[in-house]
Amino acid sequence: MLDLRHAAACSAAVLLTLLVAGAAFAAPPSPSPYDGGPPAQAPISLPILQTALFPLGTSLTSFGVAASELAGVGPQAASSTSSGTLIVDDDRGDCPNAQFTTIQGAVTAAPPGAKIKVCAGVYVEQVTIPAGKDGLTLYSVPDLAAVIKAPPVIVSTPRSIVTITGAHDVTLRHFTITGPGGGPCDSLEYGVRIGEGGSALITDNHITQIRDTPFSGCQNGVGVLVGRNSQNTFGIATVVHNLIDDYQKGGVVIDGTTDPMVADSNAEVAYNEIDGAGPTAVIAQNGIQVSRDATANVHHNVVAHNIYSPATTTGEGILTFQVDSPQLTVHHNNVYDNTDGIGLYTTANAEIGWNDSHDNVAYDGLFADTDATNNLIEHNKLRDNAEFDCDDVSTGPYNAPALVANRWVQDLGLTENRPGLCKHATP
């Protein structure tokens, strides 16, 4: 099999040699995490990938969970019996009794714990839910019919469509949250941003076109951002059963803080479909990123089509970056058709198990870099990946004769960069 990582690393500037049991292994292309990627490239037009995606608002029994089980997932909004329900309708055509024509107007007027019913319509606005608005529940009626759309020019920062800044236990459900931004670079940064210690349940939304016009190589355009390292701010979130597609840089990013005295971000990311743009030389996309001391439980997601081509930089289905915690778990995800399926970079003490990572087009099903240590990699099914199903270039005491720094336990794969990582079982 052609070793594509060797071919991509021919330049002496990027070549790093690791000697193990007399064999030499070249360093792979680096990933491109949000806030750490390569310089922006000139924007070019890119056709939108049309992909059959699972419908929102339907039973998830086939994914191993019943719809009724999701009712208790994540922060729960307070009962509206005491605080009442506020109604929003852009033209009062669907809901003549609406008190507000903008969502922000209702948020501003709402007491903590209130419910805000948003009737069908297109709401061209930024929505900010600040500290003091704890327990708000915002929901669309009918499902996905209330569209929160980015204004043509966003002047306030952060440049997000919905910003939860310091409010706790907010629920945002059944909306269509959409761009694109009106400008060629950094015109729209996020679909939903949670920071300043805020917490939220983001569920059953379609978050789409979080990108510039045209689609560009600028390092912005994240569907859901929880915390941000460069701003030393954290968030807590449950991001469950959303369709997130047509983003520019990333689907979901959970990012930690720079100050050890400030809490780090934490999230559950589950039962989402996260769909990248497909092969592009414009930007290296990542489906789900957990980074810089954030922690997360990432499970039962479908993540596909994050492909940087040519593969000089990897587009990761699931990327972990600069995290050292047993509270990072990545399990039961279906990851396919990315440059790399699951990539562990500067990651330690995490558990990566029971994932199905297959048909990734340039590199590996699961890759552990030289600085990935003491991770438990178990019971993954890795198949039909372009370079290796199982790839670990670290050095350590585990899985002789591989002698790597991570524990590979009963993983299935037909190809590996060193003998001893995976059981060679047919899919």
Image (cartoon, rainbow, N blue to C red):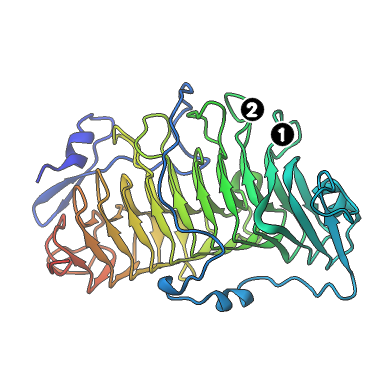
Residue 140: mark: none
Q: Amino acid at mark 2?
A: Gly
Q: Position of residue 155 (x, y in %)?
A: 75, 31
- State whether residue 252 is above or below residue 180: below
User: Horizontal placement of 275 versus 103: left or right?
Assistant: left
Image x and y of residue 285, in percent = 43, 41
User: Looking at this view, is 229 or 315 the one in front?
Assistant: 315
Q: Residue at x 61, y 60 (%)?
A: 264
Residue at position x 24%, y 46% from top?
363
Amino acid type indicated by mark 1: Pro
> Which is nearer the eye, 415 or 8?
415
**Residue 155 appears left or right of 344:** right
Q: Quadrant of the C terminus?
A: bottom left
User: Can you give x and y, in whole percent of width and height, for residue 116 in the image?
Assistant: 80, 60
The image quarter containing residue 154 is top right
Q: Residue at x 66, y 45 (%)?
A: 231
Instruction: Look at mark 1 in the image and give the residue it sits on.
Output: 151
Badge 2 element: loop
Badge 2 local density, few (<14 within 10 Å), some, or many (20+)? some
Mark 1 secondary-structure assignment: loop
**Numbered circle sitting on residue 182:** 2
Side of 257 relative to 330 (left or right): right
**Contact (CB < 8 A) between labels 2 and 1?**
yes
Q: Position of residue 325 (x, y in %)?
A: 47, 66
In the image, 280 versus 149, the foreground residue is: 149
Q: Residues within 10 Å of mark 1 (few under 14, many from 20)?
A: some
Q: Can residue 414 be seen by looking at this rendering?
A: yes
Does residue 233 show up? no
